[in-house]
Image: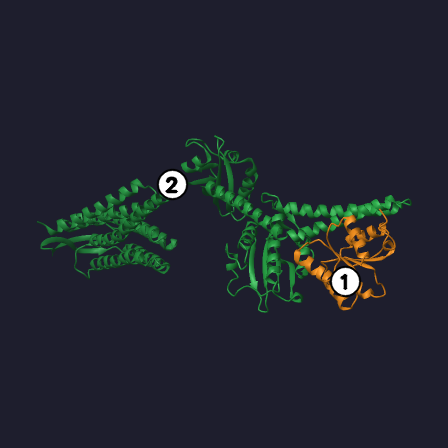
Chain colours: A green, B orange
């Protein structure tokens, strides 16, 4: 058995096997150029092994010359493939070094066929025989070196420089493993192979050509890393598949629909779940107009505007809208999306998700209805607390009306009727009647059941209306009222009756908190201010004993009360009303005694209506 | 309607009520009934004019800022002035009624006050 034949044949076979594997991968995935280059490098190495064997088996100088000459072709192919592989796999290396290495190697191949018998020798005159792996093999006896050989050596050094440069760049970038395996192995085996060739050619080193064995070393080391990449990619692919399955499960569980609008292809794609949410069939062609037509007419314009804002603004899209299904059913959906743009800010794709929120919306509606119901009951309860004040407010004009009317009767019974007196009396009766009517109207507003109706309101007027309603109550409890209104406040957006209710509740609480104070120490301060967050803040301050320390939040809990006959719902309901206005209600204790309840209500924005 | 018996019709009646419309209407009614009536917007206002203006009878509102009707009654009692007082109130309560009567009120009337009831009370006052 010849070890030389076995080793070189096995080298070639191993290389061809690698070439087959990576060539097949490239065949399945044509844009995987790095696989093709690896396969070409492996084919070239197999050819180099074959020519190495031919050199070792050469029986005449002519055969030796021919083998060395044709060896340069796979060698050229190998260098170009390796350089390309490094550039693509490490994504590094200067282009000019790459082209220099490739150019010089190409020039070397041309010179190989044009000058002398090959690039290494002008002439080989005799062979000699060596013992290698226990058998006699051929080597070059006497020959004249070809000076053009320097081009080949320069090509080798250019490749080494290019690989060094690419390796350093990859290392600095953090791809140290790739840099060591790919760059390091090429450098190690290239320098070794070049050195060996040079020593043989210049006669300093008596050895047989084993270039292919070095190149196999490069291929195996690179293949180890490259194969690892493939394994990691496969693992990633499995992870991705698992993630996709998890996402699919999650989206199926919550009925989350995906959609995407591609501006370049004028295409609107949506997942089956999304189509089902909107009542579209799986095969139906979709577009934005179809989507908008499927919406509730009241929601179309705001949704269209939301999409427009995403294109023009920061690229984010959020919307809650109703969908009118073909069977007449109404469904609430929440949509969220993000716009992807090209470098020139041209929209590329808007994609996002839609979620069925009908149950949540119905629950919200139910909660709102319940809150309105409780609010109404609490207003009725407040009116009960204010009943003596309201009786007084009504009795005063009624007393004046009755006395005036009876005075008129007495005047008219006289012989000398002064019609001017009668006119005065009638004028006063009308005025008092109107005043009584206003009291009844305020009372009726408080007692009526109504939906939440936000409207443009003036905070100072709102406080004034409540003070009119509670004037007698506060006077009867000897509460001095101080108002600190900020002039020129922006309008607020609120439900008049519900905000009056909150103020009545806070004022009644304040009055109650001061009931144990001396009469001259009961001051209620009502103030209004504009705050930074585009809102108006209303504050109700009393000079009572303050809240128990640490109870500033607890007082808002349902059923928390300090009153003997209180339900403990007033502040909890007030906070819920203020939250429904997108505002905030909180309490603050004062070191000197007393407490302040503040609440904020967003400004009314004309454009937002 | 006039004629609850002279000489009371020309007697002076002071109406004390912080509510202007009520005060004005009561003064007007009493004048129409033949009395010489004058309005005061608070107990302090009345007491400051006392004794330059010393009415024969007081029609006194109970709930007023500052001095209440009962406070005025007490002030007059302390000064030894014994003038008949008719109390009128928009808030009837047993406690207030008892307190007013204890201080010597000859009538305790609830708003809105009917002319007949008021004039009857004044006629009753004349007998004091």
On the rendered structure, is A534 left or right of A31?
right
Whether residue A111 appears in this view of the structure is no
Residue A267 in percent (x, y) is at 46, 36
> To which residue does mark 2 refer?
A252
Answer yes or no: are tags 1 and 2 on the same subunit. Answer: no
Front position in the image: A282 or A584? A584
- State the mark number for residue B43: 1
Q: Name the residue at 91% across, 44% down.
A: A415
- State the mark number for residue A492: none
Q: Do the residues labelled 1 and 2 touch (CB within 8 Å)?
A: no
Q: Quadrant of residue A132?
A: bottom left
Give the Cα distance between marks 1 and 2: 80 Å
Q: Is A260 located above or below residue A94 in the figure?
A: above
Residue A27 in percent (x, y) is at 29, 40
* Number of numbered callouts drawn: 2
**Helix, strand or loop for disc 2:** helix
- Of all chains, the one bearing label 2 is A
Q: Is A243 located above or below residue A552 in the figure?
A: above
């Amino acid at each position: 058995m010849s070890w030389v034949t076995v080793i070189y044949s096995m080298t070639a076979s191993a290389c061809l096997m690698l070439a087959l594997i990576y060539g097949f991968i490239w065949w399945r995935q044509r844009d995987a150029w790095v696989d093709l280059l690896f396969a070409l490098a492996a084919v070239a190495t197999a050819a180099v092994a074959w020519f190495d064997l031919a050199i070792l088996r050469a029986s005449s100088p002519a055969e030796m010359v021919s083998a060395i000459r044709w060896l340069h072709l796979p060698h050229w192919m190998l260098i170009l493939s390796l350089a390309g592989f490094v550039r693509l796999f490490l994504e590094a290396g200067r282009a000019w070094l790459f082209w220099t290495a490739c150019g010089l190697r190409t020039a070397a191949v041309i010179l190989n066929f044009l000058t002398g018998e090959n690039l290494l020798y002008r002439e080989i005159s005799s062979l000699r025989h060596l013992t290698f792996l226990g058998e006699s093999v051929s080597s070059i006896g006497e020959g004249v070196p070809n000076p053009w050989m320097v081009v080949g050596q320069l090509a080798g050094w250019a490749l080494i420089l290019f690989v060094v440069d690419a390796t350093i760049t990859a290392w600095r970038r953090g791809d140290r493993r790739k840099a060591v395996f790919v760059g390091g192995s090429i450098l190690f085996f290239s320098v070794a192979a070049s050195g060996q060739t040079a020593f043989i050619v210049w006669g300093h080193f008596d050895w047989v050509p084993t270039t292919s064995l070095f190149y196999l070393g490069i291929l195996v080391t690179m293949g180890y890393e490259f194969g690892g990449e493939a394994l990691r990619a496969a693992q990633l692919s499995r992870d991705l598949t698992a993630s996709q399955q998890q996402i699919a499960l999650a989206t199926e569980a919550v009925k989350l629909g995906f959609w995407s609008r591609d501006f370049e292809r004028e295409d609107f794609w949506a997942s089956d779940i999304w189509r089902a949410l909107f009542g579209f069939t799986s095969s139906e062609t979709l577009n934005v107009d179809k989507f908008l037509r499927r919406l509730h007419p009241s929601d179309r314009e705001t949704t269209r505007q939301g999409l427009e804002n995403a294109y023009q603004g920061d690229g984010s899209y959020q919307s809650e809208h109703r969908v009118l299904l073909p069977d007449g059913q109404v469904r609430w959906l929440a949509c969220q999306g993000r716009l992807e743009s090209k470098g020139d800010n041209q929209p590329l794709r808007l994609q996002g998700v839609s979620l069925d929120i009908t149950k949540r919306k119905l629950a919200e509606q139910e909660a709102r209805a319940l809150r309105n119901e409780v609010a109404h009951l609490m207003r009725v309860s407040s009116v009960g607390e204010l009943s003596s004040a309201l009786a007084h407010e009504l009795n005063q004009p009624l007393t004046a009306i009755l006395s005036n009317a009876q005075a008129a009767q007495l005047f008219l019974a006289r012989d000398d009727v002064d019609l001017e007196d009668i006119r005065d009396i009638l004028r006063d009766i009308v005025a008092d009647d109107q005043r009584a009517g206003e009291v009844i109207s305020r009372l009726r507003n408080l007692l009526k059941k109504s939906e939440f109706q936000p409207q443009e309101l003036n905070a100072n007027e709102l406080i004034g209306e409540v003070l009119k309603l509670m004037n007698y109550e506060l006077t009867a409890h000897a509460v001095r009222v101080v108002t600190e209104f900020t002039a020129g406040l922006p309008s607020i957006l609120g439900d008049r009756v519900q905000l009056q209710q909150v103020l009545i509740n806070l004022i009644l609480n304040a009055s109650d908190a001061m009931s144990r104070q001396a009469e001259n120490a009961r001051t209620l301060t009502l103030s209004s201010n504009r705050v930074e967050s585009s809102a108006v803040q209303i504050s109700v301050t009393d000079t009572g004993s303050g809240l128990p320390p640490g109870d500033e939040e607890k007082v808002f809990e349902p059923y928390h009360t300090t009153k003997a006959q209180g339900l403990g719902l007033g502040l909890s309901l007030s906070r819920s009303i203020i939250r429904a206005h997108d505002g905030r209600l909180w309490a603050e204790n004062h070191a000197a005694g007393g407490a302040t309840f503040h609440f904020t209500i967003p400004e009314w924005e004309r454009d937002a209506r | 309607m006039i004629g609850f018996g002279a000489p009371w019709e020309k007697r002076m009646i002071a109406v004390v009520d912080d509510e202007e419309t009520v005060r004005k209407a009561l003064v007007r009614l009493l004048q129409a009934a033949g009395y010489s009536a004058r309005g005061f917007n608070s107990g302090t206002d009345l007491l400051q004019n006392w004794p330059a203006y010393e009415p024969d009878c007081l029609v006194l509102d109970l709930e007023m800022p500052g001095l209440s009707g009962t406070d005025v009654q007490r002030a007059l009692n302390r000064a030894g002035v014994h003038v008949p007082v008719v109390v009128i109130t928009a808030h009837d309560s047993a406690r207030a009624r008892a307190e007013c009567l204890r201080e010597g009120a000859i009538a305790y009337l609830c708003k809105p006050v009917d002319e007949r009831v008021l004039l009857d009370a004044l006629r009753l006052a004349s007998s004091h």
